[in-house]
Amino acid sequence: MSKSRSQKTELLERYKEILKSKEGYFLINSDKADTLTTTGLKIQLKSTGANLAVVKNSIFKVALQETEQPLSTQEFDGPTAIVYFDEDPTAPAKLIKEAQKKTQLFDARGGVYEGEFLTAEKVMQLAEIPSREILLGKLLGTMSAPVSGFMNALAGNVRGLTMVLKGISEKGA
């Protein structure tokens, strides 16, 4: 169904707002996906702080040009959906990869994160990276390991001294 000029202008402004205000986005092929599958993915993405919208390519390409996005993202055809997010790009990438494995319906086309163009392969590589929370936990564990080791060494020496003193007191009694 054809859109009126005011609807197209409104849609263009919405796309430009998404591209300007969000930390990043992924473009995915949505030509084979049915409404039920797309809605299921939308719900999962919402739980990670990301959103999915099926775009009108001609208007979206204008929005990409007007917001000076990387040129490589402007080279796509066919039904397209955009997954946009504010924070962690790994969670949406994992959901896209999981949906691709389950349904064979969503193929990543590329994306942009912090102003850098990401190929489809890089988007799928993001799915392999642990989430931000897991990485922060590992960093904290790594940073606290030397202190824990030092405390165990001190406690071991004190424990050893206590055992020797206890043995001497038992021997003398």
Image: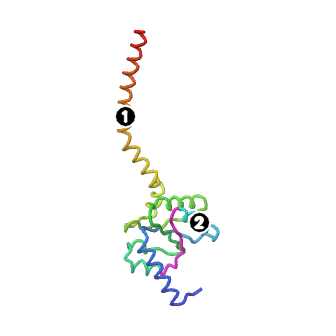
Which residue is depicted at the point 60% across and 59% down? Answer: 102
Which residue is depicted at the point 44% across and 55% down? Answer: 132
Magenta-colored span = 48-59
| Residue position for label 2 | 43
Looking at the picture, does residue 7 appear above or below residue 71?
below
Question: Residue most toward the right?
Answer: 36
Secondary structure of the residue carrying tag 1 is: helix
Left or right, 172 with respect to 9, comes to: left
Looking at the picture, does residue 51 appear above or below residue 154?
below
- Front-most of 17 and 152? 152
Quarter of the figure with the C terminus: top left
Q: Amino acid at mark 1?
A: Met
Marks 1, 2: nearer the viewer = 1
| Residue position for label 1 | 151
- x, y percentage for residue 170? 43, 12
- Marks 1 and 2, how far apart at CA: 47 Å
